[in-house]
Structures are given as C-alpha cells and as structure tokens.
Image: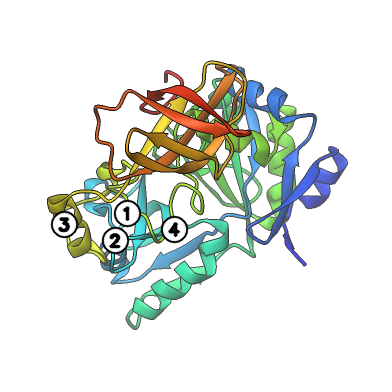
C-alpha cells in the first residue's frame, strides 16, 4: 500500500484525483492540470509535497558530512540559506538531486527525492560519526509548497512569513514551522515544513488566503517550462551533472564523492548532452520518443505541452555530444520526424 500524506483527507474533500508517486498516494489534479498551472503562473497555487524526503542532520560533523557527500560547496552559502546540490556515486552519476536548508552552524534539513529518501538517509547515517544525528522527519511532518506571484501576500496572511529566494526562516503558528524560499515552479514562493498534526490547519489557511490547490500534474508542467530536471527521467546514475548542463552545481574547490570522475570528464569531454527544444505546434513529445540531430541520437527524457507557450516542449540526451552549435533537433512523434528549434531552458522568461 502506498503511503499517504497527513493532508490526504483534506485532498479527498477537495475532490483530488490521486496518483502513486515514489510510493506515495498524492494528488495528481483537482479541477484540471491546465487551470492549476495557469493559477500558479498568474496568481498562486499550493501543493502538498509531503512525499519528498526530509531529515534533520545535526551535530559536530554535520557540516563535514554535507561537504563530503554532496557535490555543491556548502560554504558558498551560510546559515539561514538553502542550496540545490546532488549526491553522486564514484563514477559521477547522480544518485539524487537534493535541497539542503542550513538552519544553524551544525544543524541542517536535507530534502531528497521521494523514491530515494531511504537510501540517502542511510548513506548519511552510515557516514555519520558518533555524536552527529540523522533523524528522518518524513513520518512526523508535512511539506507544503506555496508558489506564484501572489505568494508573498498569501504567506504573510497564512503563516506570517515569506522568505526571499533560498532564504530559510521560522514561521508563526500553533506549531513550530520552517519555511524556505524554494520551490519547483520558477515562481516566487516558499516550502513549509510543519508537524503533521498542524498541517491541515496551515493548508486550509493558505487556501482561504487565496491559493488554489494544485496537483503533481501541474507541478510537472511548471518545472518543465523552467527546464528543471526530474530525477529518474532527466537525471540518474548513468548521467553526470556535467552532461545535464548543471556544471554550476559542482563546487570544484572541495572534495566530494565522484569528484575525480567528474574532473576526468571535464578534461576528456562529455559522452552525451542534455538539449532542450520547442515544437512549433501543439504536438507533445513524450518521454522515450526518439531524438536526433545530425549524427547524434538519443531520446526525450521529459516532454509535455506547455500551457504558457501553447506548444510542445521537451528535453533529451543526444550522443555523441552535439556541442553548442546545433540549432535544431528532430523528434519522432507517431512515426513522423518533426523538426524543432533547440532551446536552452528555461523555455519561458523569468
């Protein structure tokens, strides 16, 4: 049986349609993905993302663990900030992409993806010395994302805080909460960690303040318009951050798992490269569809209809590396090769 969010009953009352995501039964949509997508782009939406992992890392070697295990350099930021990063294997492949909230000097909240959470927790526990604690908080908390142009006013009204981009702040309410200016939509907003018993009250306050309940269908189209990768499609253990065009996530000035393999690839060249493209009509390039550009070939990793642009958009890997000079690709849709201009994401201006 899939796990359920502390907000499951609230979603049922709101008429949600559910889907299994990473072993969790989560809302796919309420009234419809297109309407929910547009609400986030123009006003504000609220997502239950409690399926995502979250664990507290605290103690004398907490900072050292984050530095050694994750490829971004935590010392690029400071307490009170959040950072996007990755855990790699020895070959440089992406085991998971992760958000880290640095709460205090030796206190972090680490947020891995849903299906990878147990493995990431175990990796940190195995590497943690005596005195450094790794506490899985997913079963005791909910995670709520409030996203959109109107999110600051709605957050102020509902929880009394609206952290700026990648800032971490404590929120107000009947139970302690932590909010960070992070999200997966490209819009301003925040993600809130709140104890399970108080999650429904917070979710209801956000909705009453004007946010539209949104499902994971809209979250996927929103993240694709921004070119944000999805682990398991755009990122996996056979792909490095360099191949995914995420060089900026790698902090070369510190030692981390997979650094030597990435350095070799940086010097020797990429095996493949992630490219973005936008069709000129409403046809939809789906995951797995064949993709080509000259002698390079591959497949679509993520593709969908863009509600903002009203055309099909996608990303996919081509091998050998086509370089930066290729200005168009072809994607096979229902047996027909369709030419599409190459686009360096994001697909929409922000």
Question: Badge 1: few (under 14), some or many (20 or more) residues near its Cα, within 10 Å?
Answer: many
Q: State if disc 1 and disc 2 touch (CB < 8 Å).
A: yes
Could you say which is closer to the camera, residue 331 or residue 115? 331
**Local SS, label 2:** loop
Quarter-of-image position of residue 311 = top right
Question: Badge 4: few (under 14), some or many (20 or more) residues near its Cα, within 10 Å?
Answer: many
Residue 263 shows which numbered tag?
3
Considering only order in the chain, which callout, 4 or 1, is on the residue closer to the N terminus? Answer: 4
Distance of label 3 from label 4 (alpha carbons) = 26 Å
Please give the name of the residue rendered at 44% of the width and 40% of the height, measured from the top-left corner.
316
Disc 1 designates what residue?
Answer: 240
Please give the name of the residue rendered at 62% of the width and 20% of the height, measured from the top-left corner.
282
Residue 323 x/y as whole percent = 24, 35
- What is the number of callouts on the image? 4
Check the picture and name the quadrant holding the C terminus: top left
Disc 4 designates what residue?
Answer: 110
Residue 92 shows which numbered tag?
2
Quarter-of-image position of residue 214 = top right
Distance of label 1 from label 3 (alpha carbons) = 11 Å
Distance of label 1 from label 4 (alpha carbons) = 21 Å
Question: Badge 2: few (under 14), some or many (20 or more) residues near its Cα, within 10 Å?
Answer: many
Above or below — where is 165 with respect to 28?
above
Q: Residue furthest bottom?
A: 130
Considering only order in the chain, which callout, 3 or 2, is on the residue closer to the N terminus? Answer: 2
Circle nearer the viewer, 1 or 4: 1
Distance of label 2 from label 1 (alpha carbons) = 5 Å
């Amino acid at each position: 049986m899939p796990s359920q969010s502390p907000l499951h009953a609230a979603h049922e009352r709101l008429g949600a349609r559910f889907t299994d995501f990473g072993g969790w039964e989560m809302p796919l949509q309420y009234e419809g993905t297109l309407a929910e997508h547009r609400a986030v782009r123009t006003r504000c939406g609220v997502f239950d993302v409690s399926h995502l992992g979250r664990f507290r890392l605290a103690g004398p070697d907490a900072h050292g663990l984050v530095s050694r295990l994750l490829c971004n350099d935590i010392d690029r930021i400071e307490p009170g900030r959040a950072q996007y990063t990755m855990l790699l294997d020895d070959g440089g492949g992406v085991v998971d992409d992760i958000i880290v909230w640095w709460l205090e000097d030796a206190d972090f909240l680490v947020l891995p993806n849903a299906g990878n959470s147990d493995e990431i927790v175990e990796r940190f526990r195995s590497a943690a010395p005596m005195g450094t604690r790794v506490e899985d908080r997913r079963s005791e908390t909910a995670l709520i994302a409030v996203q959109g142009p109107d999110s600051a006013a709605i957050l102020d009204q509902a929880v009394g805080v609206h952290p700026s981009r990648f800032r971490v702040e404590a929120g107000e309410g009947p139970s302690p909460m932590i909010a960070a200016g992070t999200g997966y939509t490209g819009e301003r907003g925040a993600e809130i960690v709140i104890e399970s018993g108080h999650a429904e009250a917070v979710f209801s306050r956000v909705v009453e303040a004007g946010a539209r309940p949104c499902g994971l269908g809209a979250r996927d189209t929103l993240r694709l318009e921004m070119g944000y990768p999805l682990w398991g499609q755009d990122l996996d253990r056979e792909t490095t951050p360099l191949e995914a065009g995420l060089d900026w996530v790698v902090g070369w000035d510190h030692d981390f798992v997979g650094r030597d393999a990435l350095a070799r690839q940086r010097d020797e060249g990429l095996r493949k490269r992630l490219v973005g493209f936008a069709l000129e009509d409403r046809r939809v390039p789906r995951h797995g569809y064949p993709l080509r550009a000259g002698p390079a070939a591959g497949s679509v990793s993520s593709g969908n209809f863009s509600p903002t642009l009203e055309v099909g958009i996608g990303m996919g890997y081509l091998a050998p590396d086509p370089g930066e000079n290729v200005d168009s690709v072809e994607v096979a849709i229902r047996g027909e090769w369709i030419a599409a201009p190459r686009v360096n994401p994001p697909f929409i201006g922000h």
